[in-house]
Image: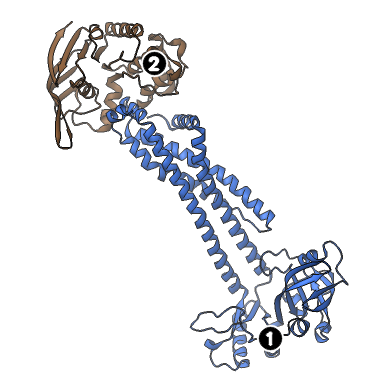
Chain colours: A brown, B blue
Amino acid sequence: MIKASKLTKIYKLEEVETVALSEVSFEIKKGEFVAIMGPSGSGKSTLMHILGALDLPTSGDYILDGESILNLNEDQLADIRNRKIGFIFQSYNLLPRTTALQNVMLPMSYAGIVKEKRLETAKKYLEMVGLSNRLNHTTNQLSGGQQQRVAIARALVMNPAILLADEPTGNIASTQANEIMKIFEDLNKQGHTIIMITHEADIANNAKRIIHIRDGKIEKDEKN
Amino acid sequence: MQDIFEIIIESLRILTLNKMRTGLAILGIVIGIGSVITLISLGQGSQKSIEAQIQSLGSNLLTVSPARQSSGGVMGQFGGGTSLVLADAKAIEDKLSETLVNKVSPEYSSRSQVVAGRNNTNVLVIGVYPQYSEIKKISMEKGVFISERDVASMTKVAVLGPTTAEDLFEDKNPIGKTIKVGNQSLRIIGVTASKGGTGFNNPDDMIYVPLTTAQKQIFGKTNLTSISIEAKSEEVMVQAQDEIGYLLLSQHKLNSPTEADFIIMSQSDLSNTVSQVTGTLTALLGGIAAISLLVGGIGIMNIMLVTVTERTREIGLRKALGAKKKTIITQFLIESILLTFTGGIIGMIFGIAASLLISKIMNIASAISLSSIILAIGVSSLIGIIFGLYPARKAANLQPIEALRYE
């Protein structure tokens, strides 16, 4: 499913080179639930951006679902993000003043799916995350946990190869965080591949495999 | 790719979220398009009415005016000199009336203050021969025009244009009343029928007196300010123009046409000159209005740039969810086109209303042409594209990670 080989990312700022990732290699198989853990500045965000096709590595290769994302142009990368990756962000990143339904429909409209199909699919996934009674609530009328559930529904609608969650519970009260983790576990049981980035050990413990990363290198890669 | 209709609905929703800002951005375009339409309509309207006025006099009318000088093809000062005299008019009538010329009308005109009771006005007083009314196709509403006898015996009579009559006597019948022009009292013998003229040298706003009365008793002059000549037909116009030229040169004892102290203009010369002047004026006014439109466009660009900056995170998110460059560009272009298009429509309505209102209040003709409306809508949409493209491209070129990190 995912094959990262010798991923290296070097940032150059005013002639000073900063190595954010240094020859990171790993494989993630279909149906895995992986947590990537590390302190801030460890390179886990950089890794997340590369895995999410938001950024390209300086060197090394990244194969997602059988396709190398190197040598792709911006629009091709946009297409990969649309079809193969479901993003769940720490700050939810829903469109403001827009209904839950419209937010969830957005990735499908970028894929050119007809409106009836979009509505039907969006409703189905919002129901799945337990928000069937909040379809037409706008973002600001929803609690943090509810917003994150909308974001999960949005990540799922394109039936992506991987779900990529960046500190998904970072902004949520702990009781609601547990609900979110429960949803993740259910999704994983249904066969979804999940990669979750976090710095909280108890959140990482929900995953079946934890990759520890520090100073741009893999420190530990263990089954949980 | 979302279909365009959905993007339009979405954009309308976004634009209505910030009504104040949207309204102010649109206002610039409203004023721009509105003033372009108003000024062009008024310009074209007065051009048309002046041309119609000139054409209504017929196409076989020649006008001789004095000029101080005419050298190297440069026209001398129009109406400046005192070179034309009654003998010139007589000579034209004597020598050319068998072959080329129908009627000759010598004229002396000057603006003067005119008093009638407590009312007074400043109008063009024109001393004429009876044939003036035939050449200029003036008909009478009341009374009679200046007669041969009036001219011969220098009677103190006057004929008023309808506008002047109303200014001086309001709705009373002016026939038989007297007016004071300079230090002469004149008895009113007639009022001409309205020709519906506008602007300068409006035939409805004139006082006609016998030529002799005007020259000797009112203004104390011996020269003429113009001679109007009706040629026998349109075909002989050029020949008549030439012959009159030679005749006047010999009358004035001048050797070559470059020394001519007069100008002979046909109606078509006159209407060409007027068209040129009013055309230039219309273009100038339109140009000034276009500048305000440009400023409006810059306002749109400014608002769109602010919008792009404000929505950096949103743009990043859209890209992360799979929006392609083209999609983002389309979205922002549609927003700016909607702004300018709406502004264009509102501006067009205001422009039409304003030009109708101004033409009513100031009695100026206005012509709202379909082409200026189409132009306004086209131009406003085009402004949306031109001034929206840079902000839209800026949005589309944002890197998704940078945009997502933006706070």
Question: In the image, B61: left or right of B338?
Answer: right
| Quadrant that contains the N terminus of chain B | top left
Question: Label 1: chain?
Answer: B
Residue drawn where x is 51% and y is 50% of the image: B375
Q: On the image, which quarter does residue A105 sit in?
A: top left
Residue A147, labelled with which disc?
Answer: 2
Residue in the foreground of this view, choosing between B261 and B232 = B261
User: Is residue A181 something that shows in the picture?
Assistant: yes
Q: CA distance from mark 2 to mark 1?
A: 94 Å
| Quadrant that contains the C terminus of chain B | top left
**Image coordinates for residue B228, horizontal then vertical, percent:** 68, 79
Decide: few, some or many residues near mark 1? Use Cα within 10 Å; few <14, some 14-19, many ≥20: some
**Image coordinates for residue B181, horizontal then vertical, percent:** 78, 76
Q: Residue furthest right?
A: B176
Residue drawn where x is 74% and y is 75% of the image: B125
Residue B223, labelled with which disc?
Answer: 1
Q: Secondary structure at mark 1?
A: loop
